[in-house]
Image (tube, helix red, strand yellow):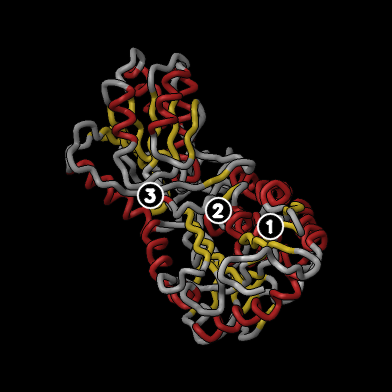
Amino acid sequence: MTPSPACFHDDRPHLIGTEWTGGGGERFHSINPASGKPVWTGPAADTELVSAAVAAARQAQADWADRPVTERIAILRAVAAEITAGSDPLHAAIVAETGKPRWEVSTEVSAMAAKVEATIDAWQERQQDSIETTAGGTAATRYRPHGVLAVIGPFNFPGHIPQGHLVPALLAGNTVVFKPSEFTPLSGRRLVELWQRSGLPPGVLNLIQGGRATGEALAPHPGHDGLLFTGSYRTGVALRQAVVTEPGKMLALELGGNNPLVVHDVQNIPAAVQLTVRSAYLTAGQRCSCARRLILTDFPGRQQFLDRLVAAIDSLRVGLPTDEPEPFMGPVINASAAASLLAAQDDLLARGGVALRAMRPLRDQPTLLSPGLIDVTGVPSRPDAEWFGPLLQVICVDNLNDAIEEANRTAYGLAAALLCDDPTSYEVFRRRVRAGLINWNRQTTGASSRLPFGGIGHSGNHRPSGFYAIDYCSYPVASLEQPTIVTPAACPGLAE
């Protein structure tokens, strides 16, 4: 078992490797949600330090973009090799700062290494220069990096999600200022250390630490050319407002979801229960693609499905990453998040919801919550909210049309899934449900690195990540070219 890192103190006011530290920002710390003990402590980057990081990225950008793409690819592959060979400190940091089970963190780290080749493939497929011969010359499309991009990371996947922005941004020739979540600063540092060991030139990747104040200094900074963000709808709106007067800045938002999982006329009920549990409760419900609403049509096995689901919840191992055997899910990120989730459950119950299984604290740990399953069928005015934790609502309807109507009763539009044996029903569902990720007989959580990942409505701004992340890291330049000047054809009213 990899030990959790001790509390990491850092108050040195200068550049260390690729990290900008010190400055006049307030000190903050990350807390291990499993133990309540501090993991990392240090000063937040203030406005002056943010500007220094942006300036360093700007100074390094032209040289980085001018290097042959083969050189950038070689560094990316070196990062993948570093992750594969030397990720123990990163793994330990993610476990300590998120409380996720070790098995789940291992899958996250593996996905980080795999992101490199998937991104190279996406670049080769989607971003290759095109030059065609035309009468008298050529017509060319070439891709150019934006310049300096700011990456703001989330806490739930503090390695994998930032990596999904960093790899395409740097491959395209951008330089980056990276701010991890204030809940996972050590994980961000360990990720950047892997990049530093890969031979990345100075100034290409710049790490700053901090919370809201640091983000507010970085988001509207005039020295960068775009923001890449994964997180909540509320923060996404704030970032859009921060750059509203600068339409030229790239803004790629991957936000949350109030995601529906529809179960309709299935025969393999045990499998449907397994997929439901994985959709709703993986990562303690702290995935943007987690199912928040379980919609059940009136099929013959509905009650059997519900009974088996309740039994599965009762047998689910919820615990700390140090537990043996390992748990299925661990704690939520902090006590404040747990309190908000319990308040949301209380609100549903006050509105008339029925607790099939109430979410509750376990082991006197304020962050360790049992999975909640609340029947809200017929409850009026249910909030359209993303409750980021193990809280699943059940809505029973008569038929598939009603299920689709209920699924679309949200301003979000990230993920949706249908568990159903009938392919015709899936075709109807796929065409009518509003979401960027629509699965059939698969869980809502998890995604293919070979597909786009993003949603509509409150779930994003049509800048999907995943295989399509390379698209928002550069822009096409069109050129009509010919090697010599030729007098154009005669034009009425213009003397030759």
Q: Secondary structure at mark 3?
A: helix
Image quadrant in which the C terminus is located: bottom right
Q: Secondary structure at mark 2?
A: loop
Q: In percent of the image, x 45 and y 47: which residue is there? A: 455
Q: In percent of the image, x 60 and y 58: which residue is there? A: 165
The residue that mark 3 highlights is 457
The residue that mark 2 highlights is 157
Q: Position of residue 127 (x, y in %)?
A: 68, 53
Q: Is residue 362 left or right of residue 230?
A: left
Upstream in sequence: badge 2 or badge 1? 1
Give the total number of marks visible in the rendering: 3
Q: Is residue 431 above or below residue 410?
A: above
Upstream in sequence: badge 3 or badge 1? 1
Q: Is residue 206 above or below residue 433?
A: below
The residue closer to the viewer here, 160 or 455, is: 455
**Mark 2 Cα within 10 Å, few/some/many (few <14, many 20+)?**
many
Cα separation, mark 2 vs mark 1, equals 35 Å
Q: Secondary structure at mark 1?
A: strand
The residue that mark 1 highlights is 141
Residue 380 is labelled as none
Q: Is residue 202 left or right of residue 312?
A: right
Which quadrant holds residue 372? Answer: top left
Q: Position of residue 46 (x, y in %)?
A: 50, 82
The answer to whether one can see residue 121 in this image is yes
Q: Amino acid at mark 3?
A: Gly
Q: Position of residue 48 (x, y in %)?
A: 53, 86
Q: Amino acid at mark 2?
A: Phe
